[in-house]
Image (spheres, rainbow, N blue to C red):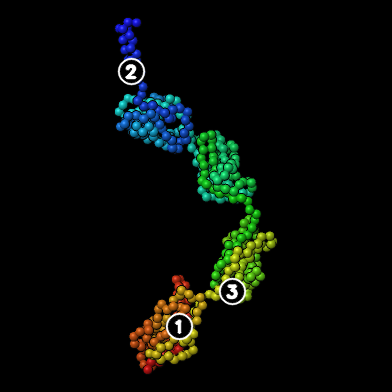
Amino acid sequence: MNAKRTRRLFFGMTMAIILVCACLPAVTVTSPNGGERWAIGSTVTITWTPTAAGSSMRITLYRGGTLEANRVGTIVEGTRGVVGSYSWTAGVTTDGVAAAGGDYYLRLKLVGEDEQDFSDAAFSLLGTIAVTSPMETAAYEASRATMSVAWTATDVSGNVRVDLERQDGPERYVIAEAVPVGGSPLSWPIPLATAEGTYRVKVSQGVLAGVSGRCFIMAYRPPFVQVLQPNGGEDIPMGGSYPVRWTPHYVEGDLRIELLKDGRLVGVLSKRTPAGGMCTFYWDASTCGGRELLSGRGFKVRVTSLDGLYTDDSDGPFTLSPRPSIALFAPNSGETWVSGTVEDIRWNWMKLEGYTVEIDLHYPDPSRPTGTGGFQIARGVTATDGKFSWTVGTVRNAGSVYFRPGVQKGCTIFVRAVKGGSVLTSESRPFKIRTP
């Protein structure tokens, strides 16, 4: 081969290589590139061979072919080509949400350039399944509960499979192998052998699936009744209405409620009360069976079904205590106190820790619309002091005597013990104040 021919051959091969390279696109789609199955609404990643820095990539969705007539909508007008990837909510374009189908293509085109590339083969957009029941934190008991499984499906036809999948263990249960996609809701009696744990329900058709919120299945428990209140450690004021509460676990009919002290029966609080409903009995905590109770420790409540099969006591003892009270005893017997002298206002008290006392003087006053006059003697006195020393006849224990000379009859001392919203009162019998 002569030199001239060699040069021609080399030149021709070089031009061919240049022409071939010139025909290769500056961008190449790598995913989806054919065969992918993406659920509409799921987050997927479109990838391509990274382009030169500063380039912008337009991504377009086509269906049934790659002609302009097959264009569905624009996914993004411009994204950085050098990155080589784009996160896409499958099926969503600027023109709306695409329908499910198996003949979709993507076109990637450099903005302002002729270079572009299509998916080599079609990929699929699948419909969606959303499980709406059981809801998050729902709870069931094996053998006693029926789970309602509900779902919605978009662009899905045929049958779906329904499974129960444990999240904290290996157990898997088939609820239904094939049920029409429109068969929601589906009722499933939970079998006795279902393991206790946290579960999700999965409704699927091939790779297309939806899952529920996490629910909890408890192991089967035999019927029982359980005392909730009082259950030990309570200090119950006597004389008020106190709620005895319980929970009946698959126990029906009526219950008997009894009071115990140091393990011995004191009496019956209620001979018959419904097991269900409010599960509450209001007890006058000063009596039992019509008899007055004495305060003390070591009390318990027992709740028993009338057939005697199910019973429960308070887990620990509780205490019955006298209710908070205050009672004036001085002045309280028709005394005559002299203005300007110091006398002690006294009261008996029970369980008044934390209370403060307000003290007022009341006396007859025909000039007033109510017929009664009065003024403040003291405020903020500690209730447990049991007394207050008053300079008789003075307002707030200060200043000059309020009364004119003479005798003021029909006077009474009024005390009010206060702690938060609790108010207890007591008033003396009438006495006299003499002012020299």
* Nearest-to-viewer mark from 3 and 2: 2
Disc 2 marks which amino acid? Ile
* Nearest-to-viewer mark from 1 and 2: 2
Q: Secondary structure at mark 2?
A: helix
Figure check: 322 above or below 136: below
Q: Are marks 1 and 3 in contact (CB under 8 Å)?
A: no
Q: Which mark is residue 387?
A: 1
Disc 3 marks which amino acid? Gly
Figure check: 38 above or below 347: above
Residue 261 or residue 419, whichever sits in front: 261
Residue 27 visible here: yes
Q: CA distance from mark 1 to mark 2?
A: 113 Å
Residue 362 or residue 301, whichever sits in front: 301
Figure check: 33 above or below 276: above
Q: Locate residue 53, reporting x and y percent.
A: 31, 31
User: Residue at point 34% right, 33% down?
Assistant: 80
Q: Secondary structure at mark 3?
A: strand
Q: Residues within 10 Å of mark 1 (few under 14, many from 20)?
A: some
Residue bearing the label numbered 2: 18
Instruction: Please state, as top left, top right, bottom left or bottom right, where the N terminus lies in the image.
Output: top left
Residue bearing the label numbered 3: 296
Residue 405 or residue 317, whichever sits in front: 317
Q: CA distance from mark 1 to mark 3?
A: 28 Å
Q: Secondary structure at mark 1?
A: strand
Disc 1 marks which amino acid? Lys
Q: Locate residue 206, reporting x and y percent.
A: 53, 34
User: Residue at point 46% right, 87% down?
Assistant: 331
Q: Are marks 1 and 2 in contact (CB under 8 Å)?
A: no
Residue 71 visible here: no
Instruction: Please state, as top left, top right, bottom left or bottom right, where the C terminus lies in the image.
Output: bottom left
Q: CA distance from mark 3 to mark 2?
A: 105 Å
